[in-house]
């Protein structure tokens, strides 16, 4: 029978048509059910929205305040006008949800009504706090705010509130506040005069647009999906901060006392030692190292004043493992994660008589920084200028955020200073690392210099261009820092290197961390006072330009540069500025680096 049916083409076609008709009918049935559900929803919503015009308007204004920090965040690459459209649409969407929910609750008993109004008042207060905090401090109700609250005592909280109140009059100078007030008043009169149908058309149209934006955000956005709802944001961020503080406390408790501190002595050859650590910056993308695109114009300009080392590499493809080795005596050939077994760099220089500063645009805890926050805990001045937790995407700042405190620390009248600054540099996503005006290079520029790379498409070339733009922006930051350093009369050192590199379609169809791409820029500037007072060290700096350097051994070089002695841990064979320096295998993530044997 089956054979007959299959053999009979007309019967087979008929059955196929019947199947298609059944599927079509099922789809039509589902669409009809969806339409019926929407009709029921509208039947429920429309009378409530029509009855509570004033409530909708107030909810609309508050909802815009609740999402202002999200929609206006620089993390969203969209024109300013579109950001305001998104903010207004999301405000309308949330206002309609709140109004309908309030309308339903206000039909209930007095107790339920009281709870509803209490919740609404709380929402209003939090929304206002969110907008004011964003306006004054650049961040709204976020993990950063939760961190501030969790680490603030009653006295500091009172001072903070006092300062905020003093700043309120400054809002009078903000034209956006006046525009918002005028628009709200106009909208109030417009809504009060509108006929019922026109009012419902306006509110429903904006609500639908807001719902579309929200749904798109849920499915397309790579972060911040819950940030549009304050009721989800506050408990989630509070729990995250609690967890973050506990993890950080555990790391801090792992720190050990500095052993035999009486053995530390220092000539303090340099009164100012400034270390700037970049992020994911590959040496091969710097024009100061021969890259065809002009990615380091500031450094190129000062080339004759710099010691540019040609053979430096990071000890890991991970920021965390690199940082713990840079900031301690942990060596590159041991497994990462055991930094607490070793004396720490900041402690060493504190004992040597330096005032220590740790300034970072990275994260105190999270995927990028991990133990470095705990390692830096003994610094005299600690400043996380960017954000406190890696998930706090709304508060990620460009590296310019470190410049004001950096200039302040450089100008500090302390006789001896060690300033460590950690940049966000070229960490993915590259376009998030620089303002729009630094979009200098494009796909065409990359394709012009990489004609032989068969795997390179225009889209991949654009990714390389974005990476190069991030290098260019870091060069600007370094140039501004060098400007501040040039003013110092005392012997001064400025050292820049990156934690690790990045493969960005360089020799294959791949972008990301790769142990073959850990070669990093390593540059030292010594001012004239340092050069004059330390001719022997300067001579060795010049001789070592092509030596194989691992940033894991940076602490030894710093000891030579500053004239600091600590024989218990010092290893002259790993100090590229020592006459006893000896070539040794360099390790990346605990394995001998294969590229060394090829050179």
Image (cartoon, grey):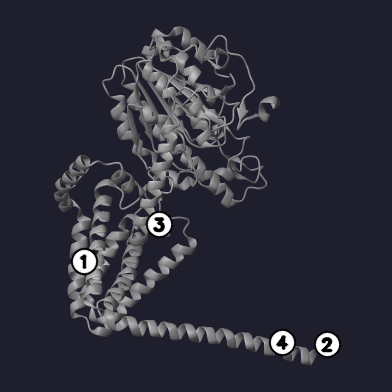
Residue where numbered disc 2 is placed: 2
* Residue tagged 4: 16
Label 4, label 1: how far apart the Cα atoms are? 60 Å
Which residue is depicted at the point 54% across and 28% down? 289
Distance from disc 3 to disc 4, alpha carbons, whole Å, reads 48 Å
Say which label, 2 or 4, has the lower sequence index: 2
Mark nearer the viewer, 2 or 4:
2
Disc with the residue nearer the chain's start (2 vs 1): 2
| Label 3 crowd (10 A; few <14 / some 14-19 / many >=20) | few
Q: Give how far apart the Cα atoms at labels 3 and 1 are.
A: 23 Å
Earlier in the chain: of badge 3 and badge 1, it is 3
**Is 283 on the left-hand or right-hand side of 304?**
right
Q: Which residue is mark 1?
A: 183
Q: Are marks 4 and 1 in contact (CB under 8 Å)?
A: no
Q: Earlier in the sequence, mark 2 or mark 3?
A: 2
> Which residue position holds label 3?
78
Q: Residues within 10 Å of mark 2 (few under 14, many from 20)?
A: few
How many C-alpha atoms fall within 10 Å of the one at disc 4: few (<14), some, or many (≥20)?
few
């Amino acid at each position: 029978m089956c054979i007959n049916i299959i053999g009979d083409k007309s019967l087979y076609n008929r059955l196929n048509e019947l199947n298609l008709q059944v599927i079509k009918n099922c789809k039509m049935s589902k669409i009809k059910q969806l339409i019926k559900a929407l009709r029921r929803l509208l039947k429920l919503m429309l009378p409530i929205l029509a009855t509570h015009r004033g409530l909708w308007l107030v909810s609309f204004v508050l909802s815009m305040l609740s999402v202002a920090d999200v929609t206006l965040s620089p993390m969203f690459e969209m024109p300013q006008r579109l950001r305001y459209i998104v903010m207004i649409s999301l405000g309308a969407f949330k206002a309609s949800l709140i109004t309908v929910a309030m309308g339903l609750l206000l039909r209930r008993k007095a107790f339920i009504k009281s709870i509803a109004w209490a919740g609404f008042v709380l929402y209003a207060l939090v929304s206002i706090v969110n907008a004011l905090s964003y306006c004054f401090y650049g961040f709204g109700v976020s993990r950063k705010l939760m961190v501030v609250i969790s680490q603030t005592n009653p006295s500091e909280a009172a001072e903070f509130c006092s300062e905020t109140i003093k700043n309120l009059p400054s809002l009078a100078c903000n034209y956006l506040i006046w525009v918002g007030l005028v628009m709200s008043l106009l909208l109030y009169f417009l809504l009060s005069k509108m006929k019922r149908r026109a009012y419902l058309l306006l509110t429903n149209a904006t609500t639908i647009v807001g719902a579309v934006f929200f749904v798109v955000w849920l499915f397309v956005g790579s972060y911040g999906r819950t940030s549009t709802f304050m009721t989800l944001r506050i408990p989630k961020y509070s729990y995250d901060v609690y967890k973050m503080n506990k993890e950080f406390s555990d790391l801090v408790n792992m720190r050990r006392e500095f052993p035999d501190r009486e053995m530390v002595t220092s000539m303090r050859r340099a009164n100012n030692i400034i270390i700037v650590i970049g992020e994911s910056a590959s040496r091969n993308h710097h024009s100061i190292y021969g890259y065809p695109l002009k990615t380091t114009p500031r450094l190129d300009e000062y080339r004759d004043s710099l010691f540019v080392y040609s053979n430096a590499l990071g000890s890991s493809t991970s920021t965390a493992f690199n940082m713990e080795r840079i900031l301690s005596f942990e060596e590159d050939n041991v497994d990462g994660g055991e930094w607490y077994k070793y004396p720490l760099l900041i402690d060493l220089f504190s004992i040597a008589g330096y005032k220590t500063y740790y300034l970072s645009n990275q994260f105190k805890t999270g995927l990028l920084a991990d133990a470095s926050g705990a390692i830096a805990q003994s610094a005299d001045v600690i400043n996380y200028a960017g954000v406190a937790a890696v998930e706090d995407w709304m508060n990620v700042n460009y590296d310019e955020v470190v410049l004001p405190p950096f200039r302040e620390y450089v100008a500090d009248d302390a006789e001896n200073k060690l300033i460590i600054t950690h940049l966000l540099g070229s960490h993915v996503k590259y376009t998030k690392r620089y303002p729009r005006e630094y979009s200098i290079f494009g796909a065409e520029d990359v394709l012009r210099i990489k004609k032989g790379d068969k795997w390179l498409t225009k889209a991949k070339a654009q990714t390389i261009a974005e990476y190069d733009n991030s290098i260019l922006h870091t060069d600007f930051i370094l140039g501004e820092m060098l400007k501040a350093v040039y003013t110092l009369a005392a012997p001064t050192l400025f050292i820049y290197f990156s934690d690790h590199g990045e493969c960005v379609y360089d020799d294959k169809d791949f972008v990301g961390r790769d142990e073959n791409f850990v070669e990093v820029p390593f540059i030292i500037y010594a001012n004239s006072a340092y050069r004059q007072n330390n001719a022997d060290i300067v001579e060795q700096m010049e001789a070592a330009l092509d030596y194989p350097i691992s940033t894991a051994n940076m602490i030894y070089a710093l000891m030579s540069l500053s004239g600091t002695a600590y024989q218990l841990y010092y290893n002259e064979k790993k100090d590229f500025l020592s006459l006893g320096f000896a070539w040794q295998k360099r390790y990346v993530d605990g394995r001998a680096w294969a590229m060394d044997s090829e050179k």
